[in-house]
Amino acid sequence: MSHLYELTVKELSNKIQSKEVTVEEVIKDSFERINATEEKIEAFITLNEEKALESARELDKKGPSTDMPLAGIPIGIKDNIVTKDLLTTAGSKMLYNFNPPYDATVMTKIYEAGMIPVGKMNMDEFAMGSSTETSYFKKTKNAWSDEKVPGGSSGGSAASVAAGQIPASLGTDTGGSIRQPASYNGIVGVKPTYGRISRFGLIAFASSLDQIGPMTRTVEDNAMVLNAISGHDVHDSTSAKKEVPDFTSLIGKDIKGMKIGVPKEFMTDGVDPMVRESIQKAMETYRQLGAIVEEVSLPHSKYGVQVYYIIASSEASSNLQRFDGIRYGYRSENIENLEDVYVKSRSEGFGDEVKRRIMLGTFSLSSGFYDAHFKKAGQVRTLIIEDFKKVFNDYDLILGPVSPTIAHNFGSDKDDPVTAYMRDVLTIPVNLAGLPGISLPCGFSEGMPIGLQLIGNYFEEEKMYQAADAFEKATEFHKMKPVILGGNA
């Protein structure tokens, strides 16, 4: 018999619903697994054991309900999503002691669904990074190799799911921060359409790009969690007034005749040959399933990284002004006047990568440079959006790699931020356009997972899940396990 920690969300749900196991047993098993593996993975910043067990016992008293299929499922929460009375640090010294007085909207929805947060996940500081190496607290390891980064910024969320500590987690995706770590760890990660999920209570990095999303081991699990956390929120003016469909409704349906475009810009020599080969095999799988797969072009996507780092850094420099050493968080002790409070608290409280982006953003917004940088970036962003719209006039989905490479070794980008930034070249255009995207495993290179990216049209996540599930069922990649989960990879 499988251990509980090896089961998917759906399998656990069935066991809870049929009373084969109690919720308390599920939660205890999750914490036992965390205790047994956390020293190796280092995915959590804060654990929530006492409250989680209390919630489990309350659910067991009520008994299961078919209206709440996710009740009792353990979930990890990225540490930039505020949780009432549970430390929320955004992976930064600046917020090392921040205990929020309220819950993010997404947390309210998690509680309403009966899911149980078991802890807060490690991440790149303020979600700025793509390897989880910029966290103030610890370096999370990739579930497949402790020499490799887990990706980022949602590295803790991804590695924990891949290692069997939890069956699901929440991450955030500003330029690929759900999809890239999902790819690196061989799990499923979804960045929903911008506005699908409320950002109220998400510590902002770049407000026009940030989006919360689920990370799981299977496509159907992912759709189930997205069902629970989506919807309009009066507290977030950018959340969409859209009816939330059942994201599992098309799962299992035939994809014959579905049109899938593969941008030639996503399959260049800059993509590792093994990654390219895996994507080509995935294209062939889709053809065998009856889909029409053709080459398309997104000519302005090549400017995505440059546009992203101007827009995201500009928004970050504005959003991070609130961390000033006065209202909450870290305050320098070595101060003599008010200016010292601001300057020294920020200098000591922020890490190098955060400072780098604040400086870049402040420069891009400054008088004399605004038109040449920020305004121009906004114009090119519009061209990128138009490229996607043209393709979606004729195609249902867009397909390509998530990342040009597999997970890299720790420290390999230490002195080269530009190389680190280029790792997000294939995910960034999706955020700039506000589209939904999914990463799912499609191959291996050197024993490390490779991720396939499917990009959907606005608010067409169901179609994206339908195609992702068809690929998952036609292949065995999602069944592969790292050694830490009993596999031989």
Image: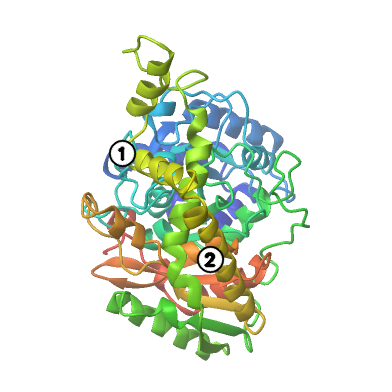
Residue 350 found in image quarter: top left
Count of picture labels: 2
* Point 57% across, 27% down: residue: 54
Q: How crowded is mark 2: few (under 14 residues within 10 Å), some or many (20 or more)?
A: some
* Point 43% across, 13% down: residue: 338
Residue 71 shows in this picture:
yes
Q: Where is residue 232 in the image (x, y as percent from the top left)?
A: 74, 48
Dot 2: element: helix
Q: Is residue 435 left or right of residue 137?
A: right
Mark 1 is on which residue type? Asp
Q: In this view, does 288 lie above or below 297?
A: below
Residue 179 shows in this picture:
no
* Residue receiving disc 1: 352
Ranked by sequence position, the earlier of labels 2 and 1 is 1
Dot 1: element: helix
Q: Could you say which is closer to the camera, residue 207 or residue 243?
A: 207
* Residue receiving disc 2: 380
Q: Is residue 304 left or right of residue 196?
A: left
* Point 70% across, 42% down: residue: 236
Mark 2 is on which residue type? Val
Give the alpha-carbon distance from disc 2 to disc 1, as whole Å. Answer: 28 Å
Image quadrant for the C terminus? Answer: bottom left
Q: Where is residue 158 in the image (x, y as percent from the top left)?
A: 42, 52
Q: Is residue 123 above or below residue 376?
A: above
Q: Where is residue 118 in the image (x, y as percent from the top left)?
A: 49, 37
Q: Marks 2 and 1: CB-CB under 8 Å? A: no
